[in-house]
Amino acid sequence: MALSLARMHWIDRHIGRVLVTAMQPLNLRRYLVAPPSVQGLDPRRVLVVKFWGIGSIALAGQTLNALRAHFPRAEFHFLTLAANADFLRHVKAVDHVVALDICGGALTVLVRIVRLLAALRRRRYDMVVDLEFFTRFSALVSFLSGAPVRVGFHAWEVWRGNLHNIVVPFNRYWHVTRNFFNLGRAAGIAAAEPPPFRLEVGADARREAEAALLAAGVRPGERLVVFNPNAGGMALERRWPPENFAGLVRELAATDGIRAVLIGAPSERAYVARIAEQAGAEAVNLAGRLSIGGLIALLERAALLVSNDTGPLQLALTQERPTLSFFGPETPVLYGPRAGCHRVLYQELACSPCINVHSQKRVRCIFGHPVCLESIPVERAAAAARALLAGRGGEGWSVRGGP
């Protein structure tokens, strides 16, 4: 069993602070010399670090492509959690995935971390680009890798020991893709704008998606709307109410002739099954039945994705599929679609957003339940979905998200 997200946050917040303090005698050079220059840098190996969030990794894709184009002779390694390793195989800019398995007891995980750090030092990276927002663990890994150039985000609210020697502010009023690209520019990217990015999907993944649909009774050519009623383990408060999802499925299936496909991770299958049961016979539950490649292929096949603010939304955006998304605890300014055929429903209550990257995305809801999402009615979502199915997009994101 993997360490829980809450336990990892506690370790990073408390033990991490002790460890970055302990590194200071080894980090004196950081205070005595100027930051390294990236002008003319020609690295042999680059390590990119992002442990959490498939959606965030997808949003970093443009920056990865830009780094790859700027350093064409470099070998790019990507350090992430083992659960994300399969996803990284769909990112063409990555040559090698370095995976950390956090399943098992604390001592087992600690041994794996020590072995990981030893392996990183042996590889002699020339540069580390730390895409984590403010975790002390990723800062420690960056420093202990031994790389002479270490680029990472900086914020006064979270002390990371100044273990990066090139620091970049995270702007909470900029979209995450823009923040990532700004970090990449500090690493040497000369391009003015991020290059295009799309996840690579092979024929096997497309066959897997089609086979799963056929097994569920979905005929070729049926118009699919994919529903993601989940929000991952980081903040379940980001979920639009399950009864609303079921009501939206019934409404669109009855009046618009679509076939509804519900998705989710294996751990979310029971939750999704309850929604599918409420939604009726037209709802197909594929939660836990697809690999990450099969999921991306399914999203490519969909006429529309209806999703909470979580990973599948970002995957659909990389594949340029229309999306309808619900925001509340988090702001679409950071994570919402920026342009194209998309609609965002966001009430913008006085208390919203209540989570941010500077506080490890811990939810502190004044009401004790997400009123910001519960107050979005099914009728409004149905109208927005119909507009998208008719090819009428929005303008990135819109406050109060009318049709």
Image (tube, rainbow, N blue to C red):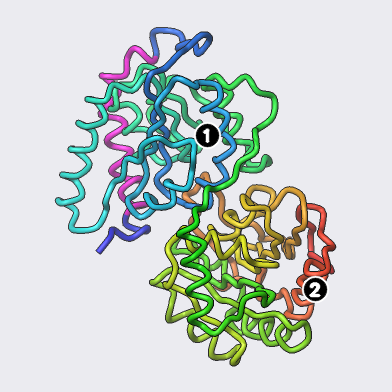
Mark 2 packing: few (<14 Cα in 10 Å), some, or many (20+)?
A: some
Q: Quadrant of the C terminus?
A: bottom right
Residue 302, position as x, y percentages in the image: 65, 67
Q: CA distance from mark 1 to mark 2?
A: 35 Å
Q: Which numbered disc, 1 or 2, marks the residue that appears first in the sequence?
A: 1
Mark 1 packing: few (<14 Cα in 10 Å), some, or many (20+)?
A: many
Instruction: Tell me if residue 165 comes above or below residue 82 in the rendering.
Output: above
Q: Amino acid at mark 2?
A: Arg
- Does the magenta portion include 100? no
Instruction: Tell me if residue 173 comes above or below residue 345 in the rendering.
Output: above
The numbered dot on residue 386 is: 2
Secondary structure category for the residue under label 1: helix
Q: Quadrant of the N terminus?
A: bottom left
The magenta stretch is: 8-30
Q: Amino acid at mark 1?
A: Leu
- Is 11 on the left-hand or right-hand side of 382? left
Q: Main secondary structure of the magenta part?
A: helix
- Is 388 on the left-hand or right-hand side of 14? right
- The residue at which mark 1 appears reads as 64
User: Is there any visible trace of residue 35 in the rendered image?
Assistant: no
- Does the magenta portion include 16? yes
Q: Residue at x 39, y 45 (%)?
A: 51
Residue 307, position as x, y percentages in the image: 62, 67
Secondary structure category for the residue under label 2: helix
Viewer-proximal residue among 206 and 176: 206
Instruction: Tell me if residue 104 comes above or below residue 28 in the rendering.
Output: below
